[in-house]
Amino acid sequence: MRGRVLTIIVLVILVALGGIFYYRYYYVFGEGNKAGTMNYFVKKGNLFKTYEGRLIQSGIRSQTQPGGGNGIGSNEFMFSVTDEKVAAKLNQNAGSFLTLHYKEYHNTLPWRGVSVFVVDSVVSATPVAPTTP
């Protein structure tokens, strides 16, 4: 009887720990689309090579700088990519105006990238015409 109770307690603890692990690292907290011009896209990492990128969104935001001053900065969306096909499409459309679909997680995993935002598809890509003076 005592061994059976101990086994049940251990199983309950393992299931609870598995649920917490799933919630923190695999549960999709949010998802949506972001649009802007890709600033950079790179594959990097020491042990796990992951794709990391940054999207510059139109508009400006105010930011408080150290020392009490206010400044103006651009809206940036930093993201990771795990799918090779999505990474190839992003590399082909460097400099284009992109709409990206992403999933947001609570925490990062080393093999998933350094951002909690993981882009899983390119919704649209529109080449940006160069400006002439």
Image (cartoon, rainbow, N blue to C red):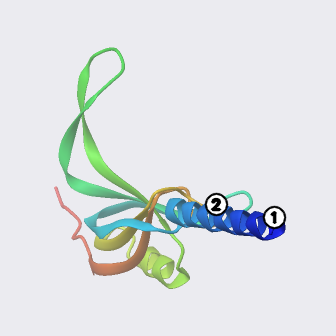
- Of 28 and 112, the residue lying toward us: 28
Give x and y (percent) for residue 53. Answer: 46, 61
Q: Is residue 129 above or below residue 20?
A: below
Q: How many marks?
A: 2
Disc 2 to disc 1, how far (Cα)? 41 Å
Give x and y (percent) for residue 116. Answer: 46, 58
Instruction: Specify the quadrant of the image occupied by residue 46.
Output: bottom right
* Disc assigned to residue 110: 2
Decide if residue 4 is on the left or right side of residue 19.
right
Circle 1 is placed at which residue position?
Answer: 2
User: Which amino acid type is shown beneath numbered disc 2?
Assistant: Pro
Instruction: Specify the quadrant of the image occupied by residue 22.
Output: bottom right
Q: Is residue 80 above or below residue 73?
A: below
Instruction: Specify the quadrant of the image occupied by residue 109.
Output: bottom right
The residue shown at (27%, 65%) is: 34
The residue shown at (52%, 79%) is: 83
Decide if residue 66 is on the left or right side of residue 34.
right
**Callout 2: SS:** loop
Q: Is residue 102 visible?
A: yes
Q: Is residue 48 visible?
A: no
User: Which amino acid type is shown beneath numbered disc 1?
Assistant: Arg
Quadrant in which the C terminus appears: bottom left
- Of 133 and 98, the residue lying toward us: 98
Give x and y (percent) for residue 9. Answer: 70, 63
Decide if residue 31 is on the left or right side of residue 50.
left
The residue shown at (35%, 79%) is: 122
* Disc assigned to residue 104: none
**Callout 1: SS:** helix
